[in-house]
Image: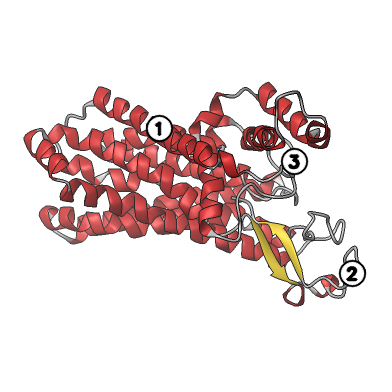
Amino acid sequence: ASSSAAKPATDASSDSVPIGKTVAAMTLAITTVMGVAAVAEVATSQSVPTFDPKKERFDQSSFIGRFSKMILACDPFLMTYSDETARAYKEMVDDYENLLQNLPNGVSEQEMSRKLWEAQRISSAALHPDTGDTIPLPFRMSGYVPFNGPICVSMVASTSTQALLFWSWVNQSQNALVNYYNRNASSEMTNETLAMSYTAAVGSALAVAFGLGTFISKRYSPEKAKSLMKFVAFPSAVVASSLNCYVVRSPEIDTGVPLVDGDGNDVLPNETSNIAAERGVISTTMSRAVLQAPVYFLPPVVMSTLPPLRNAIARNPMLSVPITTYLVLVCFGIGLPASVAIFPQMGEIKVDEAEEKYQNLLDKNGKPHSVLYYNKGL
């Protein structure tokens, strides 16, 4: 996703890319994103609610609450915890009632709740909420910026069409796998369906990203094409990322997703809702499209409006690539949680908008359900 924004930087600099400085800029960007997440956690540590695994640390009815949750969930530092540690924290979360009822000496309920919220954050970053399976490091939300970083640098450093095609394939393959591993996994998909979805997603992404570029290169003079390419980057990135997300996630629409009540209980075991699944896939696809905006627009604006950066690049054009890399990854690291936070992870659907089989179901108090919920994935 970030590579589309970074590519124009190579046109502004010399053919020689300062690899060392670019890698350093990437590392600094990842550290910056971790710092933002750490500040967010500490800043809210004194207002944590009593821990309940079926509830949220932050108010999910507001964008700020959802963004706070996602900036912590996408924290690259979460990758430093081993799978064994993540499962140990999951056991701690499962034992939360005992821990809250039998507090160690000198530990308040708020302090224990904060530890439990952190335990849940660490375990959920590594373990899928539906299956409990370990999510591979490159495809975790917390690993998106660090693992997309080298791909971004490689895209920036590419000087041939073959290299760009290869790294674009790697980039879109990672996007497809991130979408897959963070999908709603409560409904199974066949290997054949997954293979077809992956092929369609990567193929459509490459076709859009390079189809427009090839058309412009052949239609206009080199100088005119160069000036037009910057206008191609944003729409092609939006369409490619959106298609990638939709195609990989679209099988969920056929299989459906379970609907649960406000306490997280499945209201109709072994049954799924195709209507809710479609809403979840569409909202996730929209968030992927929105993600391109801060990644594409903010770095050029910052580089062209801040005098220190503008003057530094004018004196040394080779700084353009490292500075662009840093800004793109920071915007990506903050823009990703912001785009995901546009829609709540647990979507809601009015009962009268769901399938007929969900009509007239009674809650634990014997009253008809008015609203049900579903996990839309990330």
Which residue is depicted at the point 73% across and 25% down?
88
Query: Tag 3: Cα neighbours inside 10 Å, few (<14), some, or many (≥20)?
Result: few
**Viewer-side residue, 8 vs 324:** 324
Q: Please, is residue 307 above or below residue 275 in the view?
A: above
Q: Residue 342: in sight, yes or no?
A: no
Left or right of residue 312: residue 296: right
Q: Amino acid at mark 1?
A: Ile
Residue holding disc 1? 30
Q: Secondary structure at mark 1?
A: helix
- Looking at marks 3 and 1 on the same chain, the residue that comes earlier in the sequence is marked by 1
Name the mark on residue 131.
3
Tag 3: amino acid: Thr
Q: CB under 8 Å between callouts 1 and 2? A: no
The crowding category of the residue bearing disc 1, from other C-alpha atoms within 10 Å (few below 14, some 14 to 19, many at least 20), is many
| Residue occupying the far front of the picture | 106
Question: What label sits on residue 175 in the rendered view?
Answer: none
- Residue at left offset 40%, top offset 32%: 30
The mark found on residue 362 in the picture is 2
Residue at horizontal 32%, vertical 52%? 296
